[in-house]
Image (tube, helix red, strand yellow):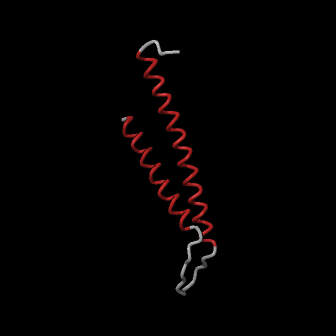
Amino acid sequence: MEPKNHHEILLKELLKVMSNRMEILAESRQAHSQLATLKHQESVGVQAGTETVTIEPRYGNEMTYLTNKCAQLDMILEAMDASED
C-alpha cells in the first residue's frame, strides 16, 4: 500500500527513525551492561593493599571491543538527538 500524501510519508519515516533509535538504544544499554559486568569481574580478584600489584587483564579484547561499541552507539544516539533539535 502506497502512502496517500506527504503526511503519511513523513509519519512512516518518523516511525522508522524512532524504531531504529529504540533498537540502537537497547543495543547500547546491553553493551554498557556487558562492559560493566566485565569490569566488575576483572576487579573482583584485586585486593586493596599497600603493595604494587600487576593486573593481567582477563577480558582485555572483549572490554576493548565493548568500549568501542559503546562509544560508537553513544555517538549515533547523540547525532540522532541533535538532528531532532
Q: Left or right: where does residue 26 sit relative to residue 3?
A: right
Image point (39%, 34%), residue name? 84
Image point (55%, 46%), residue name? 27
Q: Residue furthest top?
A: 4
Image point (46%, 18%), residue name? 8
Between residue 30 and residue 50, name the one nearer to us: 30
Please identify the quadrant where the C terminus is shown: top left
Count of marks, rendered view:
0
**10 shown above or below 19:** above
**63 shown above or below 2:** below
Image point (48%, 24%), residue name? 12
Residue 72 x %, y %: 45, 51
Between residue 63 and residue 61, name the one nearer to us: 61
Residue 23 x %, y %: 54, 40
- The image quadrant that residue 9 belongs to is top left
Residue 51 x %, y %: 54, 87
Residue 65 x %, y %: 51, 59
Q: Which residue lies furthest to the bottom in this view?
A: 51
**78 shown above or below 85:** below
